[in-house]
Image (spheres, rainbow, N blue to C red):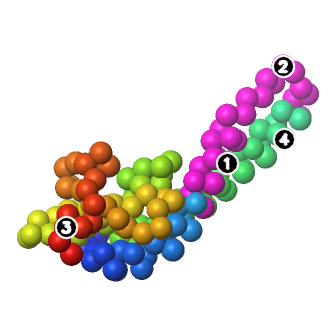
């Protein structure tokens, strides 16, 4: 998929949708991780109960995984770049002085307030006013 370049305004308009998807992805990931962490000792329960419980957990794990990747595909369609799901970091390609830069947003921020060079990460964030827009 080709890069999509955003203005501050066009990226900002995507935030409500992106925020909703990020929260859903984070919740799904927590649920998947919780199921994956369950360990059942087959020596401590009846064999039939072990098989039944293991099957239920496996079905739920795969169902949630499917939902996770389906939600991830929806996020991808917005053409933002998910940098860190846990922190809710998202970048948007933007052109500035004839070069690519990223508009940078983090879940919890009310609006896009920062940008950074494509070769620097979150630590290289600068205020939007530095973009001269």
Task: Check the image and report above or below for 89 versus 46.
Answer: below
Neighbour class for label 4 at 10 Å: few (<14), some, many (≥20)?
Answer: few
Residue stretch in magenta: 24-48
Task: Check the image and report above or below for 73 versus 88.
Answer: below
Mark 2–mark 1 CB contact (< 8 Å):
no
Q: Which residue is mark 4?
A: 52
Dot placed on the residue nearer the N-terminal end, 1 or 4: 1
Q: Which residue is mark 1?
A: 31
The location of residue 63, given as percent across then percent down, is 67, 56
- Assign the magenta stretch its main secondary structure: helix
User: Element type at marker 2?
Assistant: loop
Q: Nearer the viewer, mark 3 or mark 2?
A: 3
Task: Check the image and report above or below for 65 versus 52.
Answer: below
Front position in the image: 118 or 109: 109
Q: Which residue is mark 2?
A: 43
Task: Check the image and report above or below for 52 versus 19.
Answer: above
Residue 129, by quadrant, is bottom left
Q: Give the alpha-carbon distance from disc 2 to disc 1, as whole Å.
A: 26 Å
Residue 70, by quadrant, is bottom right
In this orientation, does residue 57 appear?
Answer: yes
Q: Give the alpha-carbon distance from disc 3 to disc 1, as whole Å.
A: 40 Å
Mark 3–mark 1 CB contact (< 8 Å):
no
Mark 3–mark 4 CB contact (< 8 Å):
no
User: Element type at marker 1?
Assistant: helix
Dot placed on the residue nearer the N-terminal end, 2 or 1: 1
Q: Which residue is mark 3?
A: 131
């Amino acid at each position: 998929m080709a890069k999509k370049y955003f203005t501050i305004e066009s990226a900002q308009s995507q935030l409500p949708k992106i925020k909703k998807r990020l929260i859903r992805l984070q919740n799904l990931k927590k649920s998947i991780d919780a199921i994956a962490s369950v360990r059942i000792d087959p020596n401590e329960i009846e064999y039939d109960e072990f098989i039944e419980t293991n099957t239920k957990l496996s079905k739920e794990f795969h169902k949630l995984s499917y939902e996770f990747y389906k939600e991830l595909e929806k996020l991808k369609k917005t053409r933002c770049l998910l940098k860190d799901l846990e922190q809710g970091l998202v970048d948007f390609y933007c052109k500035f002085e004839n070069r690519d830069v990223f508009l940078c947003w983090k879940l919890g921020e009310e609006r896009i307030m920062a940008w950074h060079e494509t070769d620097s990460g979150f630590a290289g964030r600068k205020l939007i006013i530095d973009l001269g827009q």
